[in-house]
Image (spheres, rainbow, N blue to C red):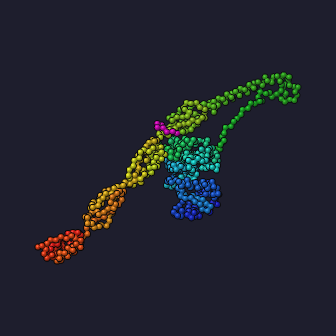
Amino acid sequence: MSTGVGPSLREPVVGRVLDGRYRVLEHIADGGMASVYLALDERLDREVAVKVMRRDLVADETFVTRFRREARSAARLSHPNVVAVHDQGEDHSDMFLVMEYVPGRTLRELVQAEGPLTPRAALDLLDPVLQALDAAHSAGLIHRDVKPENVIVRSDGSVKVADFGLARAVTTATTTNTSGTMMGTVAYLSPEQVERGIADARSDVYAAGLMLFEVLTGRKAFDGDSPIHIAYQHVHGSVPVPSDVVPSVPSVLDALVALGIARDPDQRPATAGDYLVELRRARRELGTDELDLRPTPGERERAAATRTTAMPRPGSGATSVISVLPDDTQGSDDTSYDGSPEGSDDASRVPPYEASDAPRRRWPAVLGALLVAAVLLAGGAGWWFTAGPGAKVAVPRLSGLAQPAAEQSLRTAGLRSSVTATYSETAASGTVLSTDPAGGRQVSKGSAVTLVVSRGPERYTAPQLVGTPAADVAAALERAHLKPSSANQVFSETVPAGTVVSQDPEPGTTLKPGDPVTVVVSKGREPVSVPDFTGKPLAQTKDGLAAAGFTTAEGTPVNSDTVPQGAVVSQNPKDGTLYRGDKVTLVASKGPVLVEVPKVVGKQRGVAAAALRAAGFQVSFNEVLGGFFGTVRGSDPAAGTMVPKGTTITLTIV
């Protein structure tokens, strides 16, 4: 992809640290607007690809604007099959774009190295390309420069689409290039880009169809001596049927290529996502043997030969027009009347009756010339109306035939063919449904007959909705040509509120257009009421909270005069709601405070009672013989016993 950018650009860049962060390690490639380098992001310690704009373009505001737009457009995309854009900046006189570094080889290099690929390999490569383009189209962007050089295949087989630098918003009505320079690679430009300078998502589909042709056949669909010649072919030429180049290509893939490269954009899928649906449908129609069928060595050699043979220049082999002129000398005599050589200067020797006899001598020649002209005219008219452009032929009745057989039948009848595809619930994919003009109609030889070919039943695949925000479900189903059904809501401990928990039918299910898809949406975590276990035994409380879905923690036990030992004095929170897995803190009772009964035996009644009351006990008396002496002779409980504060101590008084 070199454009002749020499050392004058590369040498000052390699080894520099751009923007104080990106150390440029080596040169990778050159493009029309910029050169690409391998660099080290010293801040994050990772390898990146840095695209540096050509310095002679930095002064051009148009190119600068386009370069900045590249960064903004590409940064909007986040998809595993899109080369990610990390940063954009300027360093002195250099403007640069920092992208994900993807080691591997381009699809162009892969096709050149391996030639025609098997159908399975071709579909495996195009599927992620269409996924990347679908992500762009869904984001309102078009690529506008889809080509094998912008598709990178890693060593592990993963595929990434690079360089969304020409992308613009799909809704923006704009020409291909306001400066008058046609953007994009001419071999992959759609007819509308060539003719009208406009592009939309269907232009990317056209280029993807050409790439599918290329990986199936090992050669470009259009080639030529100049960009103008190639551009002309996009508008006025016809792409060969892949199986005409590599006969082992299945007819269903012929139809898939024809669908993507339809000259009329209205006949193509509207987006890459729609084309992806058709690709996967075609894949399901192929058996394992068809998917893995390798081109024969002879087919590979023919494909290689077509890659190295230049296309004929326009005008070569043109029919020459030959004019038939009458011979004025036919029937003239070569001697004079008297036998003298013609051209004698003696006029007196010409008989006086020669002039009157001349018409009679010439009429056989004139009549012969008229007869020849009549024969030629009749023959030309016969040719014109039987074998030439004026000939009329009947359109063959082709309904029910496979597309390749129908096309061959038209060629045999001297007619050209074009194809339009439509869905059918009854006819197999690739089968002709009808023709325009209808079968049996008389048309001029060389006329074009449109084949209406079945795409099979219209079916779409249920998209993956689980994990999708509920607000995005309707749009995702609309893109899949399906419709949402009423959504149910459930609590979920793992799925955030407003996100799809499940769907019916499952992702990947094949459905008719407009079929409903029901989703279940998460209401978030379910709030659970906290039961009050105050006063209950600690073990019972823990079991009850665990059954409710909570975890527990224990605080420091405390004494309680009212709550028995081992029961719950308090819990936090005491009531309200929590979520399952939340924690409730429990404080257990150690029972009341224990106080030692003081020794009061031998003391007088009043002194003993005062001592006990001071220690926090209640006092009662048991008087023996009326308690005449007022002396304490015993206590119950006895002195030294540990009893709860407030316990009644009975004193025996003598």
- Near-viewer residue (339 or 149): 149
Q: Is residue 633 magenta?
A: no
Residue positioned most to the left = 625
Describe residue 523's horizontal placement relative to residue 392 as left or right: left
- Near-viewer residue (153 or 350): 153
- Majority secondary structure in the magenta region: loop
Residue 375 picture location, percent across and down: 69, 27
Does 217 appear above or below 7?
A: above
Q: Is residue 620 visible?
A: yes
- Near-viewer residue (617 or 159): 617
Q: Is residue 428 magenta?
A: yes
Residue positioned most to the bottom = 602
Residue at image location 75% in from the left, 26% down from the top = 366
Describe residue 508's horizontal placement relative to residue 72 as left or right: left
Residue 102 picture location, percent across and down: 53, 57
Q: How many marks?
A: 0
Magenta-highlighted residues: 421-430
Residue at image location 64% in from the left, 55% down from the top = 60
Residue at image location 59% in from the left, 46% down from the top = 198
Residue at image location 52% in from the left, 53% down from the top = 77
Quadrant into which the C terminus falls: bottom left
Residue 420 picture location, percent across and down: 54, 39
Quadrant into which the N terminus falls: bottom right
- Near-viewer residue (534 or 20): 534
